[in-house]
Amino acid sequence: MLEAREIKKVYTVERGIFSGSSFKVYALEGVSIKVEKERITGLVGPSGCGKSTLARILTGVEKPTEGMVLLDEKNILNYSPIERASKVSIVFQDPYSSLNPKLSIEYQIKEVLTLRKKIKKNFRFKIEKPEELLDFVKVSSRVLSSKPYQLSGGELQRVIIARAIALEPDYLLLDEPTSSLDVSIQSQIIYLLQELKNLTGMGMLFISHDINLVDCISDKVVLMKDGRIVEDEDYFKKLLNSTISLT
Amino acid sequence: MLEIRNLKVAYKRDGKRYLILRGVDLSVGENETVGILGESGCGKSTLALSILRLLKRNVEFVSGSILYKGEDILRLSEEELRKIRGGEIGIIFQHPFSSLNPCMKIGKQIEEVVRLHSSVYTVSELLKTVGLKDVEKIKNSYPHELSGGMIQRCMLAIALAGDPEILIADEPTTALDKMLEKEIIDLLKELVMKKNLSLIFISHNLGLIKYLTKKVYVMYAGVVVEEGKTDEVLSSPLHPYTEVLIESYPKKGRIKYFEGDVVDIENLPGGCKFHPRCPYVFEDCKWKEPKLFLKNNRFVRCLRQEK
């Protein structure tokens, strides 16, 4: 299990270069959350409530000011970066800024495959060539010679998901993975994620501000507001009613 | 009031010319709310910008006309056009932060428009109509000091400053989160009712189109593929593309998905442009391009419906 316990995060922000003074921003004020294997946990909240900060802390790339993240009962900061990468992975919102624009897709996929050879882990799937990895996310191998800008948003997001699952992580964090995509492409990506979950038994944390979408795909929904987790049925209903849906 | 006839618009890239609108017909009546629905790259934003001739330099009009109260906008001089822009037709854009001058205070930017169109409203009145409180403080703020929702309200204030008759909203809430979306949309709905505006609402979000508009045009690859009353189109779609859009909308408990990627205007297939993604494709679709025809009070462009 990937678990955050009483996480607090405070950022110090400078008030202009010359003023010399600064103030504190409380991004997270004691957040506890559990991401279980084989389940999709949804995390919903308005912009600026700390969703993305929490995601970065859960991957271990950012240290919390207080509290800790436990990965299989052990503090995530005690793992080596490479161990961590093979257990927790993340997909970001904007596919175009998640890859290096100057390198070909093939190069960027081979990067993770080289990493795969280096680490000692009992992999369930046999993946040696870039084509085999792309097969998992149903992208044709003709994209290998392309640069990121030549791909459509949907294809690119699939390539990014492929890179994220290459080390067969136990947990996959998805930070608004479909917000910049069209509705029809969004449903393709969601379907893919559900299939991957069933195939590998990964635990997923699906972060979004679209409560309808999260409600529709998650096994459990967690609400966030102003850096805190809200456990309130009424608030959930209020949020659900405050969005415009088709029905 | 506004009538677009067989509009064709092309853009140039690497010495080649690609048609981005391939013959669009559209009409907006007085006090009518019209939605334009489609995915990225289908030409809906180009259509919006064409109406006010705000297209980039590499984009040109090929043929067709845009009649506003009987006058062809494409033939107007810059001088005459400036009166229509903002004065007769107002527009709000998708990205609020890139639509305002970052080095100018909000109050000044709105005042500019008020002066240009010798508006009957003052800046404070405008800011109040779009539901902003603490007007004085906002007038003295720079765009970066305000939140996305507030900026979009200011953009709406600017669009309304010239007291226009038509308001074009080009995906006004895509940059905002879902909770703010409803606030802005409700405000838009209220203002359109109160001021008897005609609205052209462009979006890829079916929910918003249904909530706001009476008539809808569904666009794909630079043409209208279905046109009709919003309720009818969204409850019983005739064109398979409309069906795909409706079915992929997230619904509790099930995800339905369709293969195929959004249209690439530089590599259009032959025949019906939707056939590579169409769940009902048959042989004729691959070589014959369907025409828009009337069926059950609706216009649709599909060979299957012609049968």
Image (tube, coloured by chain):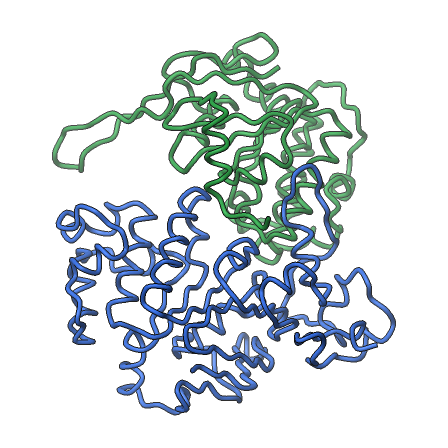
Q: In which quarter of the image is the N terminus of chain A?
A: top right
Taking depth in this image into account, of A186 and B86 the one nearest to the observer is: B86
Taking depth in this image into account, of B14 and A239 the one nearest to the observer is: A239
As displayed, is residue B46 above or below residue B69? above
In percent of width and height, residue B261 lies at 68, 57
Q: Image quadrant of residue A65?
A: top left
In percent of width and height, residue B201 lies at 46, 65
Taking depth in this image into account, of A136 and B203 the one nearest to the observer is: B203
Taking depth in this image into account, of B303 and A126 the one nearest to the observer is: B303
Residue located at (21% from left, 47% from top): B133
In percent of width and height, residue B266 lies at 63, 71
Residue located at (35% from left, 90% from top): B76
- Chain B palette colour: blue
- Chain A palette colour: green
- Is B173 left or right of B36, judged from the image as shown? left
As displayed, is residue B292 above or below residue A104? below
